[in-house]
Amino acid sequence: MKKITILSAIVSTLLLSFTFIMADVGDSCTGDASCDFEERCHNGVCIKKKEFDFGSSGKTGKPCQIDADCIGSGSCVDNGFGEKYCSGE
């Protein structure tokens, strides 16, 4: 009985910790659920949602080559597939 209690405590802790592990802006993602609340998954990379992208230049989520292409919209991040996008942060 003691082993079952310890095992269930460990499993509960692991499940709880996984719910708080979210990707930051610019991190790779597979869907919106793997990004933070203010972000969405766009072509494999987390970017800021338009409604939370205050004062940007409107380049968030657009393709880029270097950070200078994203002035006002964060940095140029790689999605892991050889494509780069402005992160919005």
Image (tube, rainbow, N blue to C red):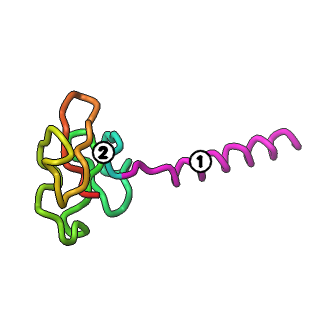
Look at the numbered disc 2 and give the secondary structure of its residue: loop
The residue at the point 12 percent across, 43 percent down is 63
State the residue position of label 2.
31
Give the quadrant of the C terminus: bottom left
Residue range corresponding to the magenta coloring = 1-24
Task: Give 6 or 27, whichever is nearer the viewer.
Answer: 27
Does residue 46 appear left or right of residue 5 in this picture? left
Q: Residue 20: x percent and y percent?
A: 52, 54
The residue at the point 80 percent across, 41 percent down is 4
Look at the numbered disc 1 and give the secondary structure of its residue: helix
Crowd rating for badge 2 (residues with CA inside 10 Å; few <14, some 14–19, many 20+): some
Callout 2–callout 1 Cβ contact below 8 Å: no
Task: Give 24 or 13, whichever is nearer the viewer.
Answer: 24
Task: Give 79 or 40, whichever is nearer the viewer.
Answer: 79
Q: Residue 64: x percent and y percent?
A: 13, 42
- Amino acid residing under circle 1: Leu
The residue at the point 26 percent across, 36 percent down is 79
Question: Is 18 within the magenta?
Answer: yes
Q: How far apart are labels 2 and 1 at the CA level? A: 19 Å
- Amino acid residing under circle 2: Gly
The kind of secondary structure the magenta stretch mainly shows is: helix
Does residue 69 appear left or right of residue 9 in this picture? left
State the residue position of label 1.
15
